[in-house]
Amino acid sequence: MKEPTLSTTIEVDGQEYQITAVFLENAVSIFIYEETPRLGTLAISVPGTDIIQASTLYVTGSSDAHFVRMLGERFASRIQKLVLLSISLKEVSSELILKIMQQTEQLLFEEKSKKE
């Protein structure tokens, strides 16, 4: 069996961010943080179907909840699995989240295709 965990660093605008993902048969857990691993604002999102859009079942933590919800639903839709997403960042902006999303998706889809 291949290693079910991805742990890597991405760079956005000169700042490093850590991404750890754990791939399960029916879900992916994704942790995005700076420096020290830390549980941040957390969302559990499910993929959509032909009838309903992707949705978030649970969000905990108040900071940047809308960003975590948006990314969780996006990743769940793209991966077609349950997604547990935690984001722990000191400074957050729409531009930063967009750049992190793009790089994270690229990593996840590269890794997903290796695991299949």
Image: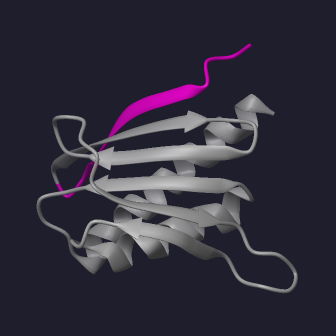
In x, y percent, where is residue 21?
49, 38
Residue 49 quadrant:
bottom right
The rendered magenta stretch, by its main secondary structure, is classed as: strand
Task: Report the quarter where the C terminus lies.
Answer: top right
Q: Looking at the image, which residue sits at the far top? A: 1
Closer to us: 21 or 107? 21
Above or below for 108 versus 54: above
Task: Report the quarter where the N terminus lies.
Answer: top right
Above or below for 116 versus 12: above
- Assess whether residue 4 is covered by the magenta stretch: yes
Residue ID at (51%, 65%): 72
In screen coordinates, is 10 left or right of 84?
left
In screen coordinates, is 52 left or right of 32?
right
Q: Looking at the image, which residue sits at the far left? A: 90
Residue ID at (61%, 18%): 3
- Count of marks, rendered view: 0
Above or below for 80 versus 110: below
Q: Give the range drawn in magenta.
A: 1-13
Residue 17 quadrant:
top left
Mark yes or no: residue 101 visible: yes
Residue 38 quadrant:
top left
Q: Looking at the image, which residue sits at the far right? A: 50
Structure colour scheme: one colour
In x, y percent, where is residue 106?
55, 51
In screen coordinates, is 113 left or right of 63?
right
Closer to us: 103 or 28? 28
- Assess whether residue 105 is covered by the magenta stretch: no
In x, y percent, where is residue 96?
27, 68
Residue ID at (48%, 68%): 58
In screen coordinates, is 80 left or right of 88?
right
Mark yes or no: residue 98 visible: no
Residue ID at (26%, 73%): 64
